[in-house]
Image: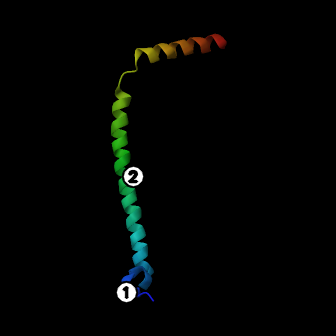
Amino acid sequence: MSDKRDKPEMISGKSAQAGRANTRRDNSAIQSILGDRLRLYYDDVAREPVPDKFLELLKQLDEKTSKED
């Protein structure tokens, strides 16, 4: 037979609810930090110039598309 004093969530649902609330808060904080770091990284990437080869490919695609219309 287990002792309910060893498990606070068994005495009151409030302890288990508080634990879940803390976990959600922790997860939210982690997601926020990850989102901020990803934005910083991809903002740097977005500021880099487009390589000439890509620009040439896009130009060729535009020309081909305009001929088909």
- Dot 1 or dot 2, earlier in sequence: 1
Q: Residue at x 51, y 17 (%)?
A: 58
- Tell me the kind of residue under disc 2: Gln
Q: Quadrant of the N terminus?
A: bottom left
**Residue 3: quarter of image:** bottom left
Percent position of residue 44, x then y: 33, 32
Percent position of residue 5, x then y: 37, 86
Which circle marks residue 55 in the picture? none
Percent position of residue 20, x then y: 42, 68
Percent position of residue 31, x then y: 39, 52
Q: Quadrant of the C terminus?
A: top right
- Secondary element under disc 1, as helix, strand or loop, is helix
Q: Residue at x 37, y 83 (%)?
A: 6
> Tags 1 and 2 in contact by the CB under 8 Å rule?
no
Q: List the residue tagged with mark 1.
A: 5
- Tell me the kind of residue under disc 1: Arg
Q: Nearer the viewer, residue 11 or 61?
A: 11
- Secondary element under disc 2, as helix, strand or loop, is helix
Extreme residue toward the front, this view: 1
Task: Give above or below for 54 relative to 18.
Answer: above
Q: List the residue tagged with mark 2.
A: 31
Task: Give above or below for 27 relative to 19.
Answer: above
Of tags 1 and 2, the one toward the viewer is 1
Q: Residue at x 44, y 15 (%)?
A: 53
**Residue 39: quarter of image:** top left
Mark 1 burial class by Cα count in 10 Å: few <14, some 14-19, many 20+:
few
